[in-house]
Image (cartoon, rainbow, N blue to C red):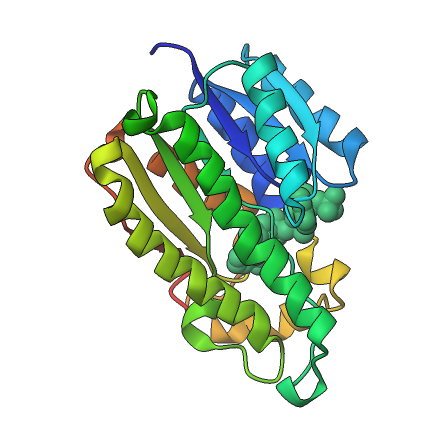
Amino acid sequence: MTERNLLITGASRGIGAAAAVLAAKAGWNVAVNCRRERAAAEEVAAAVRAEGRRALVVPADVADEAQILALFATVGAELGPLHGLVNNAGVVDVAARVDQMSAERLARMWAINLSGSMLCAREAIRRMGRSHGGAGGVIVNLSSAAARVGSPGLYLDYSMSKAAIDHFTTGLAREVAADGIRVNAVRPGIIDTEIHATSGHAERLAAAVPQIPMARLGTADEVAQAIVWLLSDEAAYVTGALLDVTGGR
Ligand code: NAP
């Protein structure tokens, strides 16, 4: 395989970190984006290098357009032409009903989960799209099974942001197919990562298990397997797909 460069947002831990290491095993050089956890991101980059690939840590908040522009400029200057993007950075908020949600909460949710993913995709298309002089490429968005179930009483704002990611994936896949860019989404179920603890939902994990047909939580590695397959040439005819990784939920 010719050398290919991948940017994964929010790759300092969890699903993004697992995808970085698995992508390196599959031959990708990886730009590891993080927001705050630079030390953890450096460990992920070291794991990528241990697979014989090049790695770069680039801190940037995907809620900030100027930081996104700087992120892509740094990746281009230090890693080279971009061939893939995983729009992984995402947040949930504390459990709340809609009648308790503030405008600030909603603005943060849309800025990170929605605008962040769209603006990163925009920058990737400007570099990878054939109409922009690129060689084509692949984008994988992180949606969630929450997009289907709505998460009432928990975080309807989060599930709405992920339903929008599904819609974005479907439409963008058709928009940029002729540009040589495939766009797909992975929809994880309940995965054992820190996202639940950082948002005060950790105690809900055990309670959720009986609702999962396979009767266990998923792992970050299991989601990463789906991401890396969608990035690969084995998925060459797959675009606009929403791939559930949910244990049947
Ligand atoms: P996680 O363990 O909380 O990791 C999230 C990563 O995103 C961290 O590296 C975090 O870095 C980064 N991040 C957060 N906000 C950011 C921002 N504004 N700019 C740049 N990076 C940012 O989460 P995860 O469970 O691995 O989730 C990864 C993706 O999968 C998310 O999109 C999530 O919605 C989706 N997902 C997860 C589950 C699940 O059950 N875990 C289920 C369905 C979908 P900092 O800490 O430095 O901010």
Residue at x-position 54% and y-position 77%: 151
Residue at position x 68%, y 25% from top?
57
- The picture places residue 197, in percent across and down from the top left corner, at 75, 60
Q: Residue 106 sits in which quadrant?
A: bottom right
Q: Position of residue 176 (x, y in %)?
A: 28, 40
Q: Dividing the image into 4 quarters, which one contains the N terminus?
A: top left
Q: Is residue 39 left or right of residue 206?
A: right
- From this view, report whether residue 239 is shown above or below residue 180: below
Q: Position of residue 66 (x, y in %)?
A: 66, 39
Against 238, residue 77 (above or below) is: above
Q: How many marks?
A: 0
Residue sticking out furthest to the bottom: 99
Camera-side residue: 246 or 231? 231
Kindly tell me whether residue 92 is visible in this rendering: no
Residue at 55% from the left image edge and 30% from the top image edge:
20
Can you see residue 48? yes
Q: Nearer the viewer, residue 131 or 153?
A: 131
Identified at 60% across, 33% down, the residue is 69
Which corner quadrant of the image does residue 206 belong to?
Answer: bottom right
Q: Quadrant of the C terminus?
A: bottom left
Residue 82, relative to residue 94: is it above or below?
Answer: above
79 relative to 137 in the view: left or right: right
Name the image quarter holding residue 155. Answer: bottom right
Q: Residue 52's x, y, as percent?
A: 55, 10
